[in-house]
Amino acid sequence: MNTWKNWSGYQQSAPQHILKPNSIEDLQQIVQQHHKIRVVGAGHSFSALAKTDDVLISLDGLQGLASYSAEKNQSTLWAGTRLYQLDDVLTPINQALINQGDIDQQSLAGAISTGTHGTGAGLPCLSALVEGFELMTAEGERLTCNREENHDIFQLGRVALGSLGILTQITMQNRPRYTLKEQLRLCAFDDIKKNLDTWKNQHRHIEFFGFLYSDQVMLKTLDETDAEIAPRQAEFPSEDAILTLCCELTRHLPALNPYLQKLLKVFVKPTTYVDWSNRIFPTPRNTRFNEMEYQLPVEQGMACLEEMLWTLRQHKAPIFFPFEFRYVKADDIALSPFYQRDAISISAHQYHKQDCWQIFNLLEPIFQKYQGRPHWGKLHSMTQQQLCELYPKWDDFMQLRQQLDPQQKWLSPYMQRLLLG
């Protein structure tokens, strides 16, 4: 029996077939032979987007650089390329992603299809940096989609959850390679509330990690620099090792949670690193977790976070992981959580050995109260009836989806409930 599970182990299924084509011709043949298909990248989504009992296709056999333009700073990449592979792919042509998140395990197509993002008040999600893509339709036809060709599919399809077809190649708008200075320090939460609105415009990237029982947060900034390379140094014990230990301790002894979190100043020391952007953006994430993330109007972000923290304290919630608070610029993509509004992204994580919904059931109504839109790749319980009210172009997208896939080849039971109700 075939088995599949995502990175955290929360999503599991038994597909009839797990197929890995090694050429575009192999992929076409598979698409033409099967009537129900889902595609998986790295399995790093926490939601059930890739879960299926039918045919599951991995694009790991379609990786690397297809072509590039030095003049435009653009690269066309095979969709199965993992983000961590881009160092080897883009460095020889002096290109780098304009922005990136702090996890680099995802496939490019998976990251694009779900609106994956980093942080920066003036920087959009990865999908908004797409200049074109090739889409394989339910009939196996290959469509070139950009601002000139098949513009309607390009405009609506940059965040499509794999529901329009299979992304095979993606053209990214990049920039010449650049170095970033990362600074991490502890900061009083009161100072964050007073100054963050100013600080967000003083740094290329800014985010903070807030804990349930600490009045201090971990503040992280990234800025372009010409300083000499000074890379991260391996530490012992690593941050991941400390995080795993604390999660295990508080899982078995919940009463320790407030005390451990108040020891932040023992574990977190001010650091400064300088390195190429693709080496600064990603942070090792070996402690497994499940995640819920919502994108909120900028003006609602801090109030939402404070209500979340207050609610969890009232319920003595068993959670050690910090909450991540980031900025993302608005875009014009129909199903992007950042459609036509600058956003605050707030992420809640729960250790994978603990019941995440014990926490998420408390948080989700608060996210929704503040007009939040869920990250498509993270856990949420929103229905089609709720989602369509959050996206002004929802009906336009669904009309195109029906036109491209009338037989619902790309829709698993989860996807049918999510998009069609």
Image (cartoon, grey):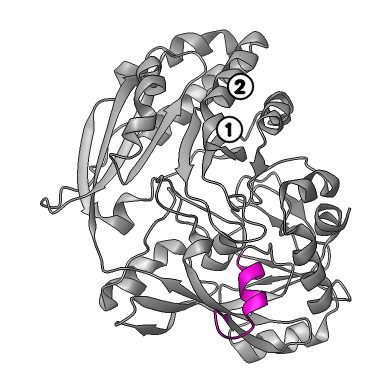
In the rendered structure, the answer to whether residue 107 lies left or right of residue 135 reads left
**Residue 150 location in percent, x, y?**
64, 83
Label 1 and label 2: CA atoms lie apart by 10 Å
Foreground of the two, 360 or 288: 360
**Residue 267 location in percent, x, y?**
32, 22
Amino acid type at circle 1 is Ala
Amino acid type at circle 2 is Met
**Residue 98 location in percent, x, y?**
36, 61
The residue mark sitting in front, 1 or 2, is 2
User: Does the segment drawn in magenta span residue 153?
Assistant: yes
Q: Quadrant of residue 87?
A: bottom left
**Residue 237 location in percent, x, y?**
33, 31
> How crowded is the residue under tag 2: few (<14 C-alpha within 10 Å), some, or many (20+)?
many
Foreground of the two, 31 or 370: 370
Above or below, comparing residue 50 to residue 141 in the picture: above
Provide the secondary structure element on which disc 2 rests: helix
Q: Which residue is drawn at 63% across and 62% down?
A: 159
Instruction: Name the quarter where the N terminus is drawn.
Output: bottom right
Disc 2 marks which residue? Answer: 308
Q: Is residue 15 visible?
A: no
Above or below, comparing residue 161 to residue 217 in the picture: below
In the rendered structure, the answer to whether residue 342 lies left or right of residue 68 reads right
Q: Quadrant of residue 2?
A: bottom right
Provide the secondary structure element on which disc 1 rests: strand
Disc 1 marks which residue? Answer: 348
The region drawn magenta spans: 146-158
Q: Residue at x 82, y 86 (%)?
A: 33
The reply to whether the C-beta atoms of the residues labelled 1 and 2 are less than 8 Å apart is yes
Q: Which residue is drawn at 22% across and 33% down?
A: 271
> How crowded is the residue under tag 1: few (<14 C-alpha within 10 Å), some, or many (20+)?
many
